[in-house]
Image (cartoon, rainbow, N blue to C red):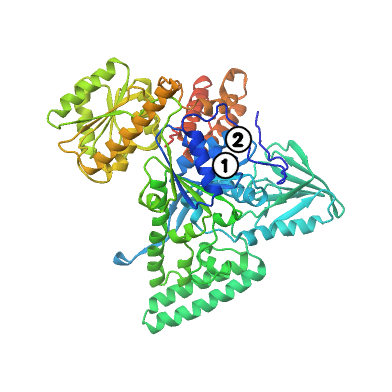
């Protein structure tokens, strides 16, 4: 049965962050939480949680949020990790608002000009409607609720409409309130909602008699407004697909369908400012003898002006955001950060990766836009359509906690307090590290692998080059080892399958380059071998080595072998840090009588939880009694779900749905009636 989750009526005075977990804090989690909370209450602006792999840093963050009761932004280095964190926080805070805010582009080619070859590249993008809905849900929750957690990628430092302007368009509907159907229709159009009496889609509304139904840009349920003359008689939520009534409301707010909305008055002012800037820039280009650039700029800008006057919008309207938002040249853009209340809290997860991204976004964007401006493709004000620079980002931060196993230079130089978290709930300690000579390393490696194979344990081997990975993998296979390799050309879905097959025992060894660091949870891996450990560089920095060592910290017998002819500074730092943590962990285990236990994770299905969500589509169905037309509908629905999952980088879920489609088609052969485009589906 199709179910839709609707948000309960919210009372800011009563609702608090309510942490729900089937377990309590263990190890040094209580001490870490206490230290962070004390620091926050004492006014510390920047703190760093240096937590070893597998120590439950996310649960620590959740406990901090629960204790300080503040709206929180969790910044992650990529949208895949952001999605994982969002799900974890939803599990920890089931009654609160946990939102997901990442770039809504499935594909994005920015506008660019290459002077050397006189090549202009127009902007090209595919917007993911589901992610766009989640972005709107995030801003809606921040403005309507105090118990909101937003998990975001660095997309959160890019421009949005001013929150005051966005909120000024919101319409508050109340049962018994005097207003007219005509007035509400006019307000919805001003908020960029489109009337569609045939199909109720997100961002549209329809009118039937004295009833208006709107599908908000941020919701899963539609809102029906029944009028009695000039009064709202009833407010109900309903399933936009089936029309089923889900519940009654006393009041509800509707926010704009787009994040960039401008009143007609402000639009007219903005158009005048654009015209003034255009006139000045054209004079400047003509005086400089750049007649081609002047002609190009005049044609493009006047076309955009005409389009905005006609329909209130144009392709690339974001390039005029300085004027539309009424900002001063050089001023920072409005972003998601402005939608938080003043006492908001920031966590930066995997800060050693996320912070350099924040720093790099501004420079790359500005360089590209300057080239467009110089050659007459854009007005100079287009440069102000940009992400926050690093100083602007941190100038807006109230209090921040950086979270990483290997904090970077910025964290270490600016933090007011470093909180350690090295004790794992499982009691597992950091792995032993051996440094061995490179002479005879391959034979030694093979012997170590065979010892693990006999104990049904797995091995990871990390090299410096793709060629080395391929050659070593080939040698291991010729030696009878069930081996495979990972590199950057292997797509995400295939990578997930390879890792799953390693856990299942299809492979005993994976050889890789830089794909064996953050994010791998492989409890069966007891040995990691690092070749060329003494070759200083990005792949053999102290941080990279510590992250790699952490991959063996899920197994009670974890061991690291570094093959090197000398011990570099990076090796020394990594070995010293691992030894320090191990001593603390062993002392804790001895003090409390803890015996390390391996992590038992079901590997029969990589997506058991996701499959449970989809069981109602195919499991235990007898397709022999279902009409072909109905099976077509099921397949069509599954196809849409699969493509949505793939576009959101939920490749495990997409693969499960793909397998379900194949299962249905196998049981009931419908080759002539399968919806067009289902044949030969691939995910990844």
Front residue (pair 161, 349): 349
Front residue (pair 112, 338): 338
Residue under pointer 2: 19
User: Could you say where residue 348 lies in the image, as x and y percent from the top left?
Assistant: 46, 47
**Disc 1 to disc 2, how far (Cα)?**
9 Å
Which quarter of the figure is the N terminus placed in? Answer: top right
Above or below residue 127? Residue 296 is below
Residue under pointer 1: 65
Circles 1 and 2: CB atoms closer than 8 Å: yes
Whether residue 10 is visible, yes or no, is: yes
| Horizontal side, residue 600 vs residue 488: left or right | right
User: Could you say where residue 29 lies in the image, as x and y percent from the top left?
Assistant: 49, 34
Nearer the N terminus, badge 1 or badge 2?
Answer: 2
Q: Mark 2: which secondary structure? A: loop
Q: Mark 1: which secondary structure? A: helix
Residue under the image location 53 percent in, 29 percent down: 610
Q: Residues within 10 Å of mark 2 (few under 14, many from 20)?
A: some
User: Could you say where residue 384 lies in the image, as x and y percent from the top left?
Assistant: 48, 66
Q: Quadrant of the rendered structure where residue 11 is? A: top right
> Outermost residue toward the left?
439
Front residue (pair 226, 680): 226
> Outermost residue toward the bottom?
287
Front residue (pair 405, 491): 405
Q: Residues within 10 Å of mark 1 (few under 14, many from 20)?
A: many
Whether residue 677 is visible, yes or no, is: no
Above or below residue 509? Residue 676 is below
Above or below residue 117? Residue 15 is above
> Outermost residue toward the front?
591
């Amino acid at each position: 049965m199709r179910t839709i989750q609707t948000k309960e009526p919210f009372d800011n005075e009563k609702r608090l962050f309510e942490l729900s977990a089937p377990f309590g804090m263990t190890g040094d989690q209580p001490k870490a939480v206490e230290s962070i909370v004390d620091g926050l209450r004492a006014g510390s602006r920047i703190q760093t949680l240096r937590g070893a792999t597998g120590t439950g840093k996310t649960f620590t963050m959740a406990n901090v949020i629960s204790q300080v009761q503040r709206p929180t932004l969790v910044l992650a280095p990529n949208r895949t990790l952001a999605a994982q964190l969002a799900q974890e926080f939803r599990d920890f805070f089931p009654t609160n608002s946990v939102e997901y805010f990442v770039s809504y582009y499935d594909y994005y080619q920015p506008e660019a000009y290459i002077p050397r070859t006189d090549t202009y590249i127009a902007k090209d993008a595919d917007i993911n409607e589901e992610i766009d809905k989640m972005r709107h849900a995030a801003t809606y929750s921040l403005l309507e609720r105090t118990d909101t957690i937003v998990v975001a990628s660095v997309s959160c430092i890019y421009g949005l409409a001013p929150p005051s302007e966005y909120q000024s368009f919101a319409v508050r509907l109340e049962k018994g309130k005097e207003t007219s159907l005509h007035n509400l229709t006019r307000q919805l159009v001003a908020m960029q909602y489109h009337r569609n009496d045939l199909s109720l889609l997100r961002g549209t509304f329809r009118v039937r008699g004295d009833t208006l139904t709107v599908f908000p840009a941020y919701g899963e349920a539609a809102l029906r407004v029944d009028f009695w003359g000039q009064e709202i008689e009833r407010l109900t939520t309903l399933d936009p697909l089936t029309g089923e009534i889900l519940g009654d409301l006393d009041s509800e707010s509707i926010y704009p369908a787009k994040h960039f909305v401008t009143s007609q008055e402000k639009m007219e002012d903005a158009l005048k400012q654009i015209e003034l800037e255009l006139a000045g820039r054209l004079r400047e280009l003509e005086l400089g003898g750049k007649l081609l650039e002047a002609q190009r700029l005049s044609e493009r800008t006047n076309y955009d002006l005409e389009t905005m006057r006609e329909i209130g919008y144009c392709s690339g309207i974001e390039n005029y955001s300085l004027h539309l938002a009424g900002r001063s040249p050089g001023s920072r853009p409005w972003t998601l950060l402005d939608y938080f209340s003043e006492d908001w809290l920031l966590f930066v997860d995997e800060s050693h990766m996320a912070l350099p991204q924040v720093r790099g976004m501004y420079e790359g964007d500005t360089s590209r836009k300057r080239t467009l401006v110089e050659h007459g493709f854009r007005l100079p004000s287009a440069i102000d359509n940009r992400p926050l620079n690093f100083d602007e980002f941190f100038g807006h931060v109230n209090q921040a906690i950086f979270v990483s196993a290997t904090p970077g230079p910025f964290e270490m130089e600016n933090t007011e307090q470093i909180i350690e978290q090295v004790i794992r709930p499982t009691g597992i300690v950091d792995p032993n590290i051996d440094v061995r000579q490179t002479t005879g390393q391959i034979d030694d490696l093979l012997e170590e692998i065979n010892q693990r194979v006999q104990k049904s344990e797995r091995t990871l081997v990390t090299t410096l080059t793709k060629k080395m990975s391929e050659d070593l993998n080939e040698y291991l296979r010729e030696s009878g080892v069930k081996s495979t390799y990972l590199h950057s050309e292997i797509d995400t879905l295939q990578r997930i399958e390879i890792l799953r097959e390693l856990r299942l025992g299809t492979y005993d060894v994976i050889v890789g380059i830089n794909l064996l660091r953050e994010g791998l949870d492989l409890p069966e891996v007891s040995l990691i071998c690092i070749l060329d450990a003494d070759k200083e560089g990005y792949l053999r920095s102290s941080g990279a080595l510590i992250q790699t060592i952490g991959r063996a910290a899920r197994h009670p017998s974890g061991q690291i072998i570094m093959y090197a002819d000398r011990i570099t500074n990076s090796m020394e730092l990594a070995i010293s840090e691992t030894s320090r943590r191990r001593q603390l962990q062993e002392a804790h285990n001895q003090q409390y009588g803890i015996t390390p236990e391996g992590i038992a994770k079901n590997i029969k299905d990589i997506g058991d939880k996701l499959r449970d969500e989809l069981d109602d589509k195919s499991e235990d169905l007898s397709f022999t009694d279902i009409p072909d037309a109905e099976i077509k509908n099921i397949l069509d629905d599954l196809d849409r779900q699969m493509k949505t999952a793939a576009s959101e980088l939920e490749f495990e879920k997409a693969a499960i749905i793909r397998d379900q489609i194949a299962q249905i088609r196998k049981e009931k052969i419908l080759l002539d009636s399968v919806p067009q485009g289902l044949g030969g589906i691939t995910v990844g």
